[in-house]
Image: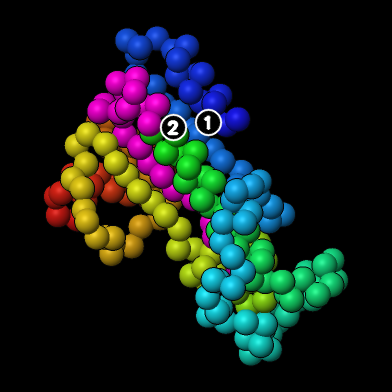
């Protein structure tokens, strides 16, 4: 529905004017659920072991233990099926992948892709079973903070490898301003990533 509405919006726009579209997906998010074929796409037995299971909570203690107890109180025994809800989470991600592809294919078909910059990002990750936890809400481990940030479009120099610069989502707004040659307003946090995207030194 979200992609269909976005396509309908672009179909109705004045093609002589540029557009800015924020295409936001609520998923993947709890509760972990997905329609077929996505919910069955990743068999439980194919899900690799966790980096850290519930035993790590005993070492971390404090708020980590509080979060674990809170989830256990609401969903007793939930961690017994962590492979299933992680498999479902992967299915939810695949569903988003397919919908993003559908939107990009629309841009191709309608002749808008060559002059459109695409920015793909996420606000946060999900424990999805790591530390025996779900969702987010305690600590800032990599599983919550290492999120995708991909730029593609005119003026952007492609890279076959992931860049290793330390960046943040607060950099997106100043990057867009710089890309469009619009002054970055005073007080804006973050920095423009345009130099690195354009292949210049950073």
Any magenta on residue 189? no
Q: Position of residue 173 (x, y in %)?
A: 39, 40
Q: Position of residue 159 (x, y in %)?
A: 21, 53
Q: Quadrant of residue 111?
A: top left
Q: Are marks 2 and 1 in contact (CB under 8 Å)?
A: yes
Q: Mark 2 to mark 1: distance in Å?
A: 6 Å
Residue 173 has which mark? none
Q: Residue at x 52, y 75 (%)?
A: 48
Any magenta on residue 123? yes
Q: Is residue 118 above or below residue 15?
A: below
Query: Is 18 on the left or on the right of 58, as rendered?
Result: left
The residue at which mark 2 appears reads as 103
The residue range painted magenta reads 105-128
Query: Is 187 on the left or on the right of 164, as rendered?
Result: right
Q: Is residue 183 above or below residue 14?
A: below
Q: Residue at x 62, y 56 (%)?
A: 40
Sequence-first disc among 2 and 1 = 1
The chosen color scheme is rainbow
Mark 1: which secondary structure? helix
The residue at which mark 1 appears reads as 3
Q: Residue at x 81, y 75 (%)?
A: 77
């Amino acid at each position: 529905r979200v992609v269909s509405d976005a396509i309908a919006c672009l179909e109705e726009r004045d093609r002589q004017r540029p557009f800015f579209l924020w295409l936001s997906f609520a998923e993947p998010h709890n509760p972990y659920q997905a329609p077929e074929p996505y919910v069955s796409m990743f068999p439980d037995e194919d899900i690799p072991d966790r980096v850290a299971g519930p035993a790590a909570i005993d070492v971390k203690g404090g708020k980590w233990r509080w979060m674990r107890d809170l989830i256990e109180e609401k969903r007793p025994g939930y961690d017994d099926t962590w492979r299933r809800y992680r498999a479902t989470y992967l299915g939810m991600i695949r569903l988003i992948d397919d919908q993003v592809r559908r939107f990009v294919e629309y841009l191709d078909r309608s002749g808008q892709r060559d002059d459109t910059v695409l920015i793909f990002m996420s606000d946060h990750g999900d424990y999805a079973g790591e530390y025996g936890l779900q969702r987010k809400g305690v600590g800032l481990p990599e599983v919550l903070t290492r999120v995708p940030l991909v730029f593609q479009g005119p003026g952007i120099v492609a890279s076959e490898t992931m860049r290793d610069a330390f960046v943040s989502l607060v950099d997106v707004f100043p990057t867009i301003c710089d890309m469009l040659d619009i002054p970055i307003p005073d007080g804006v946090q973050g920095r423009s990533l345009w130099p690195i995207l354009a292949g210049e030194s950073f």
